[in-house]
Amino acid sequence: MKGENMFGILIVKGEISARGCSPGSRATPPYLKADINIAFKPHPTGANIPYIPATSWVGVMRNLLEKYYDLPANAPRIVRAKRIVAPIHECEDDAEKLKCPVCKLLSRRDVVAWFDDAEPKGTRYQVTPRGDRVEVRNEQGQTVATIYLKTEVTIPREPERVKIPREYTGWRMEPIPRNVQMVSGIFEFAAKFDIGRLQIDDIRPFFVGLALLEDYYVGRRGTRGYGRVEISNISVRLRGRPYYEGVGREIEIPEIPKTPKEILEKWKEVKDAIERAKKKLEEELKPR
């Protein structure tokens, strides 16, 4: 169906079991402070819970998808009008974007996919400081996030090298130990897709990206074996005009497997289930 009957938002939700990711903060960071005695003091309040920013988990997922589909990183990104950071892939015109598995989802001017920050599982939280860490519990008493400090060793970057006095040129620079904040826990994520402008197969790369995330890391660090995630308890539902106008309900799709790889393995069945939900929505929109 076309026109107004085609409007529909596919909601994909799930849980991220995170180990050692870099946390975002609703408050002024850091969560934990260190004074000269290396006594770590907790910083957050109950309202300022840790989270994994969508820019983090979706950004890493996009980078992995570019590699997976062997797409060129041709668009440099600029920060504060001067600092160029790692380039990303982006097709040059709209016609190319509609053929690209990544740009079709993530680079269109008529936005067809958007994503939420991943926040601790639950709706109400209690924050408890415990020495050198902070625990976050939800309304059921479940520990859903732990913020702690990890010591890592960093190698001095190029800007630091240029400050070396000339007489020390060529000397070996020693690694620098530092404390970094990490967060582990269970976080809930959500993604929305405008299926009025997308085919169901267009959404498949999103699940490929989730599967790739499990073999990579989220956050600024991870090369030493932390910042890892595991994704589970995926659910899918469809919302149409009646839902948003307050005269109907969302359509749950119970046949969906719970992990990204299971969804990909059974993609034909998943696709058929979503098609049935679309037809059900179309039936609800027909004049009575």
Image: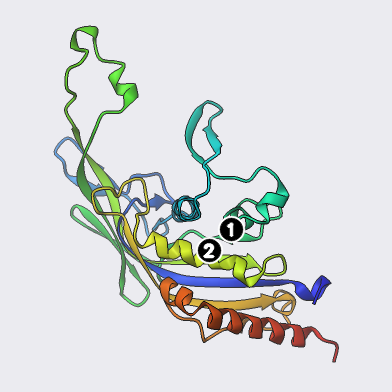
Q: Are marks 1 and 2 in contact (CB under 8 Å)?
A: yes
In the image, what residue type sits under mark 1? Pro
Q: Position of residue 235 (x, y in %)?
A: 50, 77
Quadrant hosting residue 99: bottom right
Q: Mark 1 vs mark 2: which is more N-terminal? A: 1
Task: Give 167 or 268, whichever is nearer the viewer.
Answer: 268
Q: Position of residue 272 (x, y in %)?
A: 60, 83
Residue at 66% across, 52% down: 97
The residue furthest top is 167
Q: Position of residue 105 (x, y in %)?
A: 61, 58
Quadrant hosting residue 230: bottom left
Residue at 37% across, 50% down: 219
Tell whether 58 sits left or right of 150. Answer: right
Task: Give 253 or 95, whichever is nearer the viewer.
Answer: 95
Indicate the secondary structure of the residue bearing disc 1.
Answer: loop
Q: CA distance from mark 1 to mark 2?
A: 7 Å
Where is 24 relative to 254, above or below? above
In the image, what residue type sits under mark 2? Pro
The residue furthest right is 287
Q: How is the image coloured?
A: rainbow
The residue furthest front is 70
Residue position for label 1: 101
Residue at 26% across, 28% down: 156
Tell whether 31 sits left or right of 92. Answer: left
Task: Give 226 or 48, whichever is nearer the viewer.
Answer: 226
Residue position for label 2: 205
Q: Quadrant of the C terminus?
A: bottom right
